[in-house]
Image (cartoon, grey):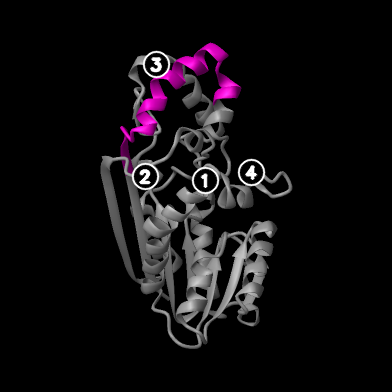
């Protein structure tokens, strides 16, 4: 259920990214999110007594993982969403770790509330895809780290899979109804132009370059690419209520905004069986970067 009182970031993270389906959310946590978190923290080289700044903390996936893995650690939760900070703060109280937490509202490219050389580790997960000033963000990461501090980030490389070919929508072959699906694709393109939007204006080489220009040393990057059958099962309702990111409508909302009832019926007749049978192709590129100040 949508909560109209939450900002777009909180509403997407806590509801819309999984189509409102709690079973899908739990599956995603187990198969994807927890392994991503653990890999980020491995590259961060957590030690006793460290202070970790989790930039764009979201629902606290990395931050709470750090608090759990090293009991003497201290974590600064940073995000542009006050709703998500409030959510994490409530969880921290429930988990009885609030005394090891600090909550700061800030964007990745302006961490001015964090003092120079005051943290041991900076982490992010899927944050820079929403930041236009990526080079400035890397300079901020470098500034707040102590000498010898570690940066460990995870970013999807959307440029690898976007834009989709004309006969593909969300990984499914919609060639027989491509003229209808094109109206949906045009709506998403207007909201997030593939030539200029921060989600698709960089690749893994840019991340390395940004880190190097900021002053980081011993820079490492691991790229994971997958092209294969869609393995995540999602029912039709979940698919309709899914939004790819906080800034775009759900597929159902996009249909209502751009298609006639007849077009919705035709597209549904073709697409629904493909979704329910998992007959699509997934294309993804994920990058892990870690470096030292």
Which numbered disc, 3 or 4, marks the residue that appears first in the sequence? 4
Q: Does the magenta portion include 277?
A: yes
Quote the CA–CA distance across marks 3 and 2: 24 Å
N-terminal of the pair, mark 1 or mark 4, is: 4
Q: Name the residue under label 1.
A: 21
Q: Residue at x 54, y 53 (%)?
A: 133
3D distance between C-alphas at marks 1 and 3: 27 Å
- On the image, the x and y values in percent for residue 116 come to 58, 77
The residue that appears at 38% across and 71% down in the rendered structure is 291
Q: In which quarter of the image is the N terminus?
A: top right
Which mark sits nearer the N-terminus, 2 or 1? 1
Query: In this view, which residue lies farthest toward the top?
Result: 262
Q: Is residue 134 above or below residue 100?
A: above
Which region of the structure is painted magenta?
255-283
Q: Mark 4 points at which residue?
A: 1
Marks 3 and 4 sit apart, C-alpha to C-alpha, by 30 Å
- Closer to the chain start, of discs 2 and 4, is 4
Residue 89 visible in the displayed image: yes
- Residue designated by label 3: 177
């Amino acid at each position: 259920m949508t909560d109209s009182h939450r900002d777009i970031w909180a509403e997407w993270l806590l509801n819309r990214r999984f189509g409102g389906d709690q079973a899908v959310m739990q599956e995603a946590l187990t198969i994807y999110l927890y392994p991503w978190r653990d890999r980020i923290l491995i590259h961060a080289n957590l030690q006793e007594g460290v202070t970790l700044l989790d930039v764009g903390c979201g629902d606290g996936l990395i931050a709470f993982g750090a608090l759990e893995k090293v009991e003497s650690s201290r974590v600064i939760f940073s995000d542009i969403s006050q709703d998500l900070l409030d959510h994490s703060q409530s969880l921290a109280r429930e988990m009885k770790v609030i005394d090891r937490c600090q909550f700061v509202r800030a964007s990745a490219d302006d961490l001015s509330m964090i003092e120079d050389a005051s943290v041991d580790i900076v982490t992010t997960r899927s944050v820079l895809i929403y930041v236009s000033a990526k080079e400035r963000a890397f300079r901020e990461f470098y500034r707040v780290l102590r000498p010898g501090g570690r940066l460990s980030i995870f970013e999807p490389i959307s440029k690898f899979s976007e834009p989709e070919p004309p006969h593909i929508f969300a990984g499914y072959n919609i060639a027989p109804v491509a003229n209808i699906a094109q109206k949906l694709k045009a709506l998403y393109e207007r909201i997030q132009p593939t030539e200029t939007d921060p989600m698709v204006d960089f690749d893994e080489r840019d991340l390395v370059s940004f880190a190097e220009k900021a002053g980081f040393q011993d820079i490492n990057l691991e790229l994971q690419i997958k092209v294969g059958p869609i393995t995540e099962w999602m029912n039709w309702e979940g698919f309709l209520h899914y939004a790819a990111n906080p800034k775009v409508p759900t597929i159902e909302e996009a249909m209502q905004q751009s298609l006639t009832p007849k077009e919705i019926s035709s597209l549904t007749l073709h697409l629904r069986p493909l979704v329910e049978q998992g007959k699509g192709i997934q294309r993804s590129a994920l990058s892990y970067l870690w470096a030292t100040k």
